[in-house]
């Protein structure tokens, strides 16, 4: 599901900036979610990294100018994987971190898969780069959030009871733990809940923010190359 939404967001963002019939030029390295689910569920991060490395190599060989990983969960092994890759990566946390900092937030909740919520690789990045404390739901709440992602959202199944559960958890974290906003830390969550559900509680759609940042990067790169060409 996330790949399709990214394609739509990227094309909409390019067209809104350039107009006419302009859309993004994209290379898509599709990944079998069955493989991803197995790696994540068993904690086989080395296996996942090897699988992702094949996809990254294919994108580089295809001439990609910038790489996006359309999953918060799959960013866990990316720092190490990208060290030897000669193409820049836009990390999914950075556009969201910048948006939260610009909003003046200091403490936010995060929803996502179990690894996103219970591991530190995204929380630490938000803290170190943007000075934002990221808090996770309780263990029982994490279990519910994770199951809804894997059993429903990745299959484009949207249930009102699941939406109510997500909002119940968000409301509790706001009320009891002082969360000032919510990171939609799985790139399908916005399909179920989004800003209009809680207008006075900032929600950060990592997928849309990621795409906006990628288009900004691409267009600035084109502009700089044109400037350099005129200077020669």
Image (tube, rainbow, N blue to C red):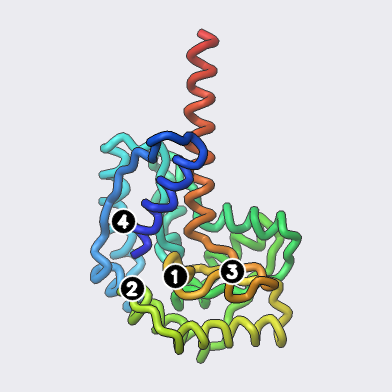
Mark 3 is surrounded, within 10 Å at the Cα level, by few (under 14), some (14 to 19) or many (20 or more) other residues, namely some
SS type, badge 3 = helix
3D distance between C-alphas at marks 1 and 2: 8 Å
Residue 116 drawn at (x, y percent): 49, 71
Task: State the residue at coordinates (73%, 66%).
Answer: 106
Q: State if disc 2 and disc 1 touch (CB < 8 Å).
A: yes
Seen in the picture, residue 66 relative to 103 is either above or below; the reply is above
Q: Which residue in the protein does label 4 denote?
A: 52
Q: Which residue in the protein does label 3 denote?
A: 195
Task: State the residue at coordinates (43%, 81%).
Answer: 146
Depth order, front residue of 69/44: 69
Q: Which residue in the protein does label 1 denote?
A: 191
Q: Along the polypeptide, which appears first: circle 2 or circle 4?
A: 4
Mark 1 is surrounded, within 10 Å at the Cα level, by few (under 14), some (14 to 19) or many (20 or more) other residues, namely some
Q: Along the polypeptide, which appears first: circle 1 or circle 2?
A: 2
Seen in the picture, residue 167 relative to 107 is either above or below; the reply is below
Q: Which residue in the protein does label 2 denote?
A: 156
In the image: residue 123, left or right of residue 15: right
In the image: residue 45, left or right of residue 218: left
3D distance between C-alphas at marks 3 and 2: 19 Å
SS type, badge 4 = helix
Seen in the picture, residue 196 relative to 171 is either above or below; the reply is above
């Amino acid at each position: 599901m996330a790949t399709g939404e990214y394609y739509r967001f990227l094309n909409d963002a390019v067209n809104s900036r350039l107009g006419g019939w302009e859309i993004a030029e994209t290379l898509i390295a599709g990944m079998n979610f069955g493989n991803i689910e197995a790696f994540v569920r068993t904690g086989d991060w080395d296996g996942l990294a090897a699988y992702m490395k094949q996809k990254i190599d294919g994108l580089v060989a295809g001439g990609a100018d910038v790489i996006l990983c359309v999953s918060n969960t799959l960013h866990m092994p990316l720092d190490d994987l990208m060290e030897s890759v000669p193409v820049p990566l836009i990390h999914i946390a950075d556009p969201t971190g910048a948006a939260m900092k610009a909003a003046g937030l200091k403490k936010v909740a995060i929803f996502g898969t179990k690894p996103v919520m219970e591991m530190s690789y995204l929380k630490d990045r938000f803290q170190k780069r943007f000075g934002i404390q990221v808090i996770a739901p309780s263990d029982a709440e994490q279990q519910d959030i994770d199951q809804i992602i894997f059993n429903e959202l990745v299959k484009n199944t949207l249930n009102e009871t699941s939406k109510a559960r997500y909002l119940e958890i968000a409301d509790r974290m706001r009320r009891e733990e002082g969360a000032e906003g919510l990171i939609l830390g799985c790139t399908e969550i916005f399909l179920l809940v989004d800003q209009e559900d809680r207008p006075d509680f900032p929600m950060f759609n990592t997928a849309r923010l990621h795409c906006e940042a990628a288009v900004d990067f691409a267009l600035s790169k084109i502009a700089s190359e044109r400037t350099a060409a005129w200077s020669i």
